[in-house]
Image (cartoon, rainbow, N blue to C red):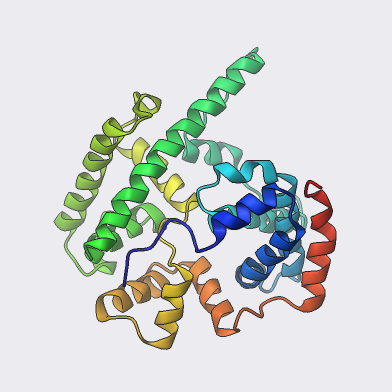
Amino acid sequence: MPAESKHESGDRWLIEELCRGSSIAFQQLVDRFGGRLRAFASRQLAGSGLDPDDAVQETFLSLVRNVHKLPEVRSLQGYLFTILRCRVADLARSRGPTAGALSLDAANAATGYEPPGPGASPSTYARRDEAVEARATVLADVLDDLLTGLKEQRRFRDVKILELLFSVGVNSKDAARLADTSEPTVSRTRTALLEELQRAVSRHPKADALADLPAGDDVSSLVRTIWTDALFSCIKRSTLGSYALGVLDDEWRDYVRFHLEVAGCEICQAHLEDLEKDGQGISVATRERIVASSVGFLKR
C-alpha cells in the first residue's frame, strides 16, 4: 500500500474549475464530499435536535463565498471539515448563550496568534496575519514530508506515537500505553520529531518565516494545531475502502484500525460510514437545496 498522498485524486481539478465558476464542478464537489460531511455533522449533532443538513449546506455556501482562497488550500477535504466544524459550533451556540461557546483566547493560543496592542495600524494586522500564515505554511510543508516518509518506510509505531501526541493530545504516559510501547520510546520519538522539524525548516525556501520558531511546549502546541487543521492523520478514501473490504496488508490494516479505534478519528469514522452507504449520505432533496443555495455565488 503506497503512502497517503497530499490530495485525493481530482481535487486539484475541482479547485481549478471552481475558481473558473464551473457549476458542474460544484455539483461534483457536493457529490464527492457531501456524504462524509453529513456523516460527521450527524455524529457531532446527535441528540441535539439540530439538522446536520443545515451544517452541510452552510459549509458549501461558505466555501463558494470564499472560492478565491481555494488555490492556497493544501487539502480540499481539510478545508471543508474546518468550515464544517465552525458551522457545527455555530449551530450549537445558537441553542443558548453558552452552548457550544468557543474560547477566543484558547483558539489564539493554539495557533500562535497574538492580538496587536491598542492603537495598532491596519498594516500591523496585515503583517501579523502574513507572518502567521507563512509560519503555518512552512511547518505544514515539513510535517507533510516527514509523515509521508514515515509511512513510506512503514514506521507505523512512530506515526502512532506522533498522532497520539500531536493530534489526539494525550500525555507521554498514555501515548506509551495506547501505542503499546515505553515512555522512553515516546520521549525519544517526540524529541526526534522536533529536531527533524528544526532541520527541515532550515532547508525550506521560506525558512526565514520561522526564524523565531519557539521551543518546547510552544512549538508542540503549534505543531498540534497545524496537524489537526491539515488532517495529516486522516486516511485516504481508497485506503479506507480497502480496509472495509479486508484487503489491506497486515501493517496497514493495523495502522488504520489504530487510527479509527484507538486515536478515534471522527472524520475517518464518518468517511468510512459514508463509504459503507456507497456515497449516498445525502438525499437528492438536500443535494438540490445545497446546489441551489450555493451555485449562484460562483463567478459567471
Q: Please report the residue visible at 62 percent of the width from the left and 73 percent of the height from the top.
A: 39
Residue 203 lies, in percent from the top left, at 27, 33
Q: Quadrant of residue 295?
A: bottom right
Q: Nearer the viewer, residue 92 or 195?
A: 195
Residue 298 lies, in percent from the top left, at 78, 49
Q: Please report the residue visible at 32 percent of the width from the left and 33 percent of the height from the top.
A: 204
Q: Please report the residue visible at 32 percent of the width from the left and 56 percent of the height from the top.
A: 148
User: Taking 245 as reference, is 150 left or right?
Assistant: left
In this rendering, is residue 200 above or below 234? above
Q: Quadrant of residue 191?
A: top left
Residue 137 lies, in percent from the top left, at 45, 38
Q: Please report the residue visible at 50 percent of the width from the left and 48 percent of the height from the top.
A: 74
Q: In which quarter of the image is residue 256?
A: bottom left
Residue 51 lies, in percent from the top left, at 76, 69
User: Taking 293 as reference, is 17 left or right?
Assistant: left
Where the N terminus falls, by quadrant? bottom left
Q: Which of 34 and 128 is in front in this view?
A: 34
Q: Which of 25 and 296 is in front in this view?
A: 25
Query: Can the viewer see residue 53?
Result: yes
Query: Can the viewer see residue 174?
Result: no
User: Taking 149 as reference, is 170 left or right?
Assistant: right
User: Taking 252 as reference, is 268 left or right?
Assistant: right
Q: Which of 229 and 27 is in front in this view?
A: 27
